[in-house]
Image (spheres, rainbow, N blue to C red):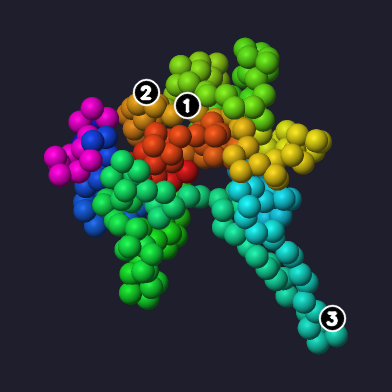
């Protein structure tokens, strides 16, 4: 299929401006992950050179003190039959802690007050998994997220080109800067790339210190991330990324404006997980 560019959105006047609703059909549940076609996944496999494997996930216990007032994870070992075997129990596990994907039920397209493809809050609020799984993460789990991932290491680039950069301070990373990082790393984007942006936030967090301890008491901690705005939305959509992830708290700079934020446009507007 021919993918419309940003200026061609929406594909029908009944949809809100700048949204990708209906691009993959009105009943679609996975959004930009549709870009991960079998052909593109096969091409991604050709990138494997050494066969080395490594995780991108953070430990389940991180952050040690959850942000935004979320519940603290408690890990219990349950001994059974006098030590013949053990069970792991994780109490108070919140799927918005540690490393995670924001599924398409997480954030609505704020201007329309609807989720991706026009799904209402009532549709989600009254959800019963057995009868209504609209935009559920189970649709993603059926095939998983498999494709070519591209890392833009902004944190390492900034050590040379922006030495005053601090991932614990609110800083808006522009698309011009991401283009500079891509050129510095000699990265060429392809349709359906899974974009990974490293700011250095996680590495800084793991060092500890007073600024890390202070995060727990803040409703909206400061954090570096990409700059919200139409230039960013156009850049992301026209590169046709299948998903985006980062090592920071959100993808975008914190605090952010709910009325104009990447969460709203990417998640609710494009159907892009982050």
Question: Separation of disc 3 and disc 1 at Cα?
Answer: 53 Å
Q: Which mark is residue 75?
A: none
Q: Which residues are magenta?
A: 6-16
Earlier in the chain: of badge 3 and badge 2, it is 3
Q: Secondary structure at mark 3?
A: loop
Q: Is residue 48 magenta?
A: no
Query: Which label sits in the foreground, 3 or 1?
Result: 1
- Is residue 265 shown left or right of residue 225? left
Secondary structure character of the magenta stretch overall: loop
The kind of secondary structure element at disc 2 is helix
Q: Which mark is residue 227?
A: 1
Disc 2 target residue: 231
The image position of residue 2, as x and y in percent, is: 21, 36
Residue 31, position in %: x, y? 33, 48
Q: Position of residue 27 (x, y in %)?
A: 24, 57
- The reply to whether discs 2 and 1 touch (Cβ–Cβ < 8 Å) is yes
Query: How far apart in space, not on screen, are marks 3 and 2 (Cα)?
Result: 59 Å
Which residue position holds label 3? 83
């Amino acid at each position: 299929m021919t993918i419309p560019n940003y200026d061609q959105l929406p594909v029908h006047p009944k949809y809100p401006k700048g949204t990708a609703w209906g691009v993959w059909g009105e009943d679609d549940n996975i959004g930009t992950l549709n870009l991960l076609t079998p052909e593109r996944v096969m091409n991604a496999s050709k990138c494997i050179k050494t066969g080395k494997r490594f995780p991108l996930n953070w430990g389940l216990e991180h952050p040690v003190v959850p942000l935004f007032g979320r519940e603290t994870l408690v890990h219990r070992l349950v001994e059974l039959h006098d030590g013949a075997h053990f069970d792991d129990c994780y109490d108070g596990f919140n799927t918005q802690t540690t490393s995670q994907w924001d599924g398409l039920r997480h954030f609505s397209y704020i201007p329309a007050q609807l989720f991706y493809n026009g799904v209402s809050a009532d549709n989600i609020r009254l959800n019963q998994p057995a009868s209504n799984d609209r935009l559920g993460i189970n649709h993603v789990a059926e095939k998983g997220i498999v494709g070519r991932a591209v890392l833009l290491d902004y944190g390492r680039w900034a050590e040379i080109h922006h030495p005053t950069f601090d991932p614990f301070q609110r800083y808006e990373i522009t698309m011009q800067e991401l283009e500079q990082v891509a050129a510095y790393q000699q990265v060429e984007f392809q349709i359906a790339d899974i974009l990974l942006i490293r700011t250095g936030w996680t590495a800084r967090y793991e060092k500890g210190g007073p600024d890390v301890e202070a995060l727990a008491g803040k409703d909206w901690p400061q954090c570096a991330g990409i700059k919200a705005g139409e230039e960013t939305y156009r850049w992301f959509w026209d590169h046709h990324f299948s998903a985006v992830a980062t090592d920071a708290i959100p993808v975008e700079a914190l605090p952010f404006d709910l009325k104009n934020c990447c969460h709203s446009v990417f998640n609710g507007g494009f159907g892009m997980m982050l």
